[in-house]
Image (spheres, grey):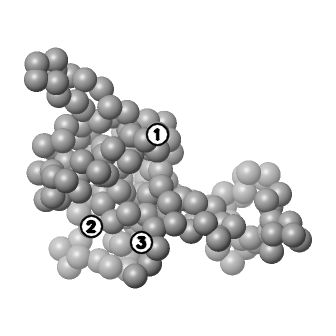
């Protein structure tokens, strides 16, 4: 069985998996991005056990991806709103969605299409150079050592 941490990995992907790598986490974030806010909405959408959902929501709040807000006093009831940190996962979610549409496709077609509210066109994620603004193919991407990767840590 795989461990739950990647403490020996000097890797941004491993650190990201520490936060969003559990089975239901990205689906909860997806649903929050779609506008679901309440416990029952998440449970109905996902069919997830109540105790598992409770744990996942608590972890997402602790990790700063969702904020818990009271919407009813008696009895106390809460909703879960995505934070900026969760919204920053949209590109990753779209990448996973589009990958699934192309490589794990449903014969009926994609379940969702990312549309642009402004013009109605389709939204795609792209690799773009921040220096020149040019679109880059995967073959042109170099994964170079960053400041955290030093001789003593390799």
Number of dots carrying numbers: 3
Q: Height in image: 38 above or below 71?
A: below
- Secondary element at image label 2: loop
- 35 relative position to 126: left or right: left
Foreground tag (3 vs 1): 1
- Of the two numbered discs 3 and 1 on the same chain, state the one appearing first in sequence: 1
Drawn side of residue 149 relative to residue 116, left or right: right
Residue 30 rendering spot, x and y as whole percentages = 32, 51
Q: Residues within 10 Å of mark 3 (few under 14, many from 20)?
A: few
Position of residue 8 in the picture relative to residue 74 (left or right): right
Rendered position, 102 above or below 66: below
| Mark 3 secondary-structure assignment | helix
Residue 99 tag number: 3
Q: Measuring from the top left, give residue 134's x and y in whole percent.
A: 72, 58
Q: Which mark is residue 110?
A: 2
Residue that label 1 marks: 64
Near-viewer residue (90 or 19): 19
């Amino acid at each position: 069985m795989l461990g739950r941490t990647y403490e020996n990995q000097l890797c941004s992907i491993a650190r990201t998996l520490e936060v969003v790598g559990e089975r239901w986490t990205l689906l909860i974030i997806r649903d929050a991005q779609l506008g679901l806010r309440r416990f029952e909405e998440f449970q109905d959408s996902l069919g997830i056990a109540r105790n598992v959902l409770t744990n996942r929501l608590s972890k997402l709040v602790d990790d700063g991806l969702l904020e818990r807000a009271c919407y009813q006093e008696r009895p106390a009831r809460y909703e879960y709103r995505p934070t900026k940190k969760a919204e920053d996962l949209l590109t990753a979610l779209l990448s996973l969605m589009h990958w699934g549409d192309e490589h794990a496709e449903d014969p009926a077609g994609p379940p969702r299409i990312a549309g642009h509210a402004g013009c109605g066109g389709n939204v795609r994620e792209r690799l773009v150079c921040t220096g020149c603004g040019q679109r880059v193919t995967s073959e042109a991407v170099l994964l170079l050592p960053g400041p955290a990767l030093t001789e003593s840590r390799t």
